[in-house]
Image (tube, rainbow, N blue to C red):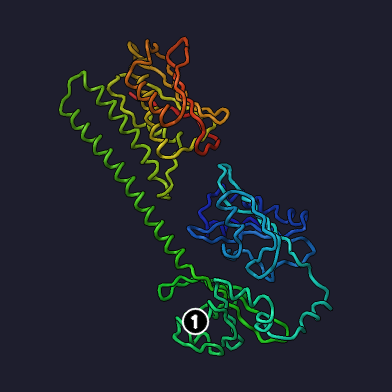
Amino acid sequence: MVKATVEQLCKQHTDLTDQDIQILQEMAFSLQTYADLSGSYMFIDCKLKPSNQAIVVAEAFPSGRTPLYDNSVVGKIVFESFEPGVFYSYRNGKKSIIRQAMTQEGKVVDQTVVPIKNTCHQVIGVLIQEKEVTPSLPDDHVKKFSVIPGTAEDRMMNSGLGVVSNLLMEMLILTDSSDRLVYANPSGLKLISEMSGHEEVLNQNLLDMLPFLRPVYEQQDDVFVFELTIQRKNLIVKKIKMREKNKPQETLLIIQDITELRTKEKELMMKSVVIKEIHHRVKNNLQTVASLIRLQMRNGLPIESRASFEETLNRIYSISSVYEIILTKGHADDDDVNIINLTRKICSTMVLNEYNLKVDLIIEPNGNKIITTSGKAVSIALIINELIQNALKHAFQGKEEGVIDVEFTVENDFVELHVSDNGVGMKDPKTSLGTEIIHNLVINDLNGEFLYVPREIGTHAVIIFPVGAEVEIFDEKTDHYSGR
């Protein structure tokens, strides 16, 4: 039953793969054991499809203990404003500990959040452990507290909370059982006056003055969060029903103006669109240049010039591959490039016709997934292209076929790129234009080292550069590309 619920909620509300869901199902199946061992309330949350919210997909509480919440929270939406630790762990992939956290149902707990990662080290959910700070009180204590005189607004104004509420940027609004305004801090009074046009607002019906709040009041949940846009303002409204024994129900509204935040988000979104458009134009311009070169080649070239044109084409294709990989991503502002995937793309698009031989290009990641920024990726793409072209040009003279091996290793925070062949070798590899290009890129762009390793058969070039960007190790397979 637990596994079925997790699967149903994840498939309906998230973008998780079947493999990711299976990991969560196995963890949910053991959740009761975790709860009993730790004496804590346990939950699994997953992020919703493109959204800043999450959903509870599993829960468990210690056997024999009263549930922390009045009703099951499975299937409930989780808001960042109430549980920031959940979203911190989701974004950063790190453990989060919050003392005396306030849950969405008004419970005070010590909360620990741990990210749940798949085999690719991607965060697919979070495991939450909650311990109630204040234990259950005996009935006689409850009775003592329940007969304390005074309404909520009296206690608020006659305690230090009144001073604090006056200093808050958030708007605090308290209404009675008839929805009449009985208290508002200065920010709340200002909002009501500005939007209603009334100067005298106390003891007036709040929903008559601010009818846009009616949907919030119509919700039956004790705690409800709602975002709305009214008069060019973006507001987050949190409604909390104040229930006291033998007292009429009151409703507390906490309203936060997030207009500036939403404006910044739109600006960032526009910036992302502009960046994506720039990437598109760079890629299209490179393809236009490549098309012009191909057109020139079809219209006739001297034999001695054809090889140079194909080398230029391959350089253009290598740079273009970087932008093609970036544009396949969902986030326009994410310009990180997987170097292994980039190498595969370069090898699959290289022009080999001029060399008139059968070549097997073998890529060996050795379990490495190497991620760099787009700027560094362009340099690496050109380096890989030049090393392969040098091998094609010099290694297989007098041969009809050959093997070029591209291997990646990571040692002591340094990336090593090995390109080797089984050809006749190069007499003086340091004098060609290709090696000059490689040398300049390695030294100036990668802050690395370029050298040739002596070997009996063929040529072995090595590029070594420090790990300046993120380097993660996943399972990668060996790929072969054959071409003529």
- Image point 55% across, 35% down: which residue? 475
Left or right placement of residue 252 versus residue 277 in this view: right
Q: Is residue 99 above or below residue 341?
A: below
Spot the residue most to the left. Answer: 299
- Image point 52% across, 87% down: which residue? 201
Q: Is residue 69 above or below residue 384?
A: below
Write down the residue under mark 1: 192
Residue 1 visible at all:
no
Q: Nearer the viewer, residue 448 or 310?
A: 448
Q: Name the image quarter holding residue 219.
A: bottom right
Q: Nearer the viewer, residue 468 or 79?
A: 468
Q: Nearer the viewer, residue 3 or 294?
A: 294
- The quadrant of the rendering that contains the N terminus is bottom right
Crowd tier of the residue under label 1, counting other residues whose Cα lies within 10 Å: few below 14, some 14–19, many 20 or above: many
Q: Amino acid at mark 1?
A: Ile
Q: Is residue 205 above or below residue 218?
A: below
| x and y, in percent, of residue 422 in the image | 43, 15
Q: Is residue 36 above or below residue 325?
A: below
SS state under label 1: helix
| x and y, in percent, of residue 41 in the image | 72, 60
Q: Name the image quarter holding residue 186.
A: bottom right
Residue 14 visible at all:
yes
- The quadrant of the rendering that contains the C terminus is top left
| x and y, in percent, of residue 232 in the image | 40, 72
| x and y, in percent, of residue 343 in the image | 42, 32
- Image point 61% across, 62% down: which residue? 83
Left or right placement of residue 166 versus residue 439 in this view: right
Q: Nearer the viewer, residue 402 or 332?
A: 332
